Image (cartoon, rainbow, N blue to C red):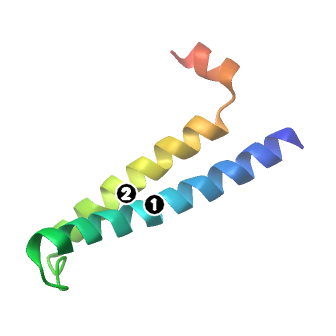
């Protein structure tokens, strides 16, 4: 039950982080450029998604992997 709860929380937090990071990057780019069509370039979209996904994946792993196992991995 503890593993299921940890996994559920990790997935939820990871997805929320991905969405929040994409929103923050898009908002920052809009703030700097001043127009809405900020990421029409596919490469910029891929970079935005990659950065957001990496943040979400890192948070999900930090929640999902138990502390004892994290110590063994290091």
Label 1 close to label 2 by CB (< 8 Å): yes
* Circle 1: element type: helix
Q: Residue furthest left?
A: 33
User: Crowding near pointer 2: few (<14 within 10 Å), some, many (20+)?
Assistant: many
At horizontal 80% and vertical 47% (from top left) the residue drawn is: 5
Residue, disc 1? 18
Where is residue 56? Give x, y as percent. Answer: 47, 52
Q: CA distance from mark 1 to mark 2?
A: 5 Å
- Is 36 left or right of 16, judged from the image as shown? left
Residue 29, image quadrant? bottom left
User: Crowding near pointer 1: few (<14 within 10 Å), some, many (20+)?
Assistant: many
Q: Nearer the viewer, residue 52 or 34?
A: 34
Where is residue 19? Give x, y as percent. Answer: 46, 66
At horizontal 90% and vertical 44% (from top left) the residue drawn is: 1
* Circle 2: element type: helix
Residue, disc 2? 52
At horizontal 39% and vertical 49% (from top left) the residue drawn is: 54
Q: Is residue 33 above or below residue 1?
A: below
Where is residue 18? Give x, y as percent. Answer: 45, 60
Q: Residue furthest bottom?
A: 36
Where is residue 41? Give x, y as percent. Answer: 14, 76
Q: Nearer the viewer, residue 33 or 60?
A: 33
- Is 50 left or right of 16, judged from the image as shown? left
Residue 72, image quadrant? top right
Q: Is residue 56 above or below residue 32?
A: above
At horizontal 85% and vertical 39% (from top left) the residue drawn is: 2
- Is 40 left or right of 13, judged from the image as shown? left
């Amino acid at each position: 039950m503890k593993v299921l709860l940890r996994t559920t929380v990790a997935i939820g937090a990871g997805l929320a982080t991905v969405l929040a990071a994409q929103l923050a990057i898009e908002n920052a780019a809009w703030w700097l450029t001043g127009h809405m069509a900020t990421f029409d370039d596919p490469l910029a979209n891929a970079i935005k998604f990659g950065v957001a996904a990496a943040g979400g994946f890192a948070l999900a792993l930090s929640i999902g992997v138990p502390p004892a196992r994290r110590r063994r991995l290091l």
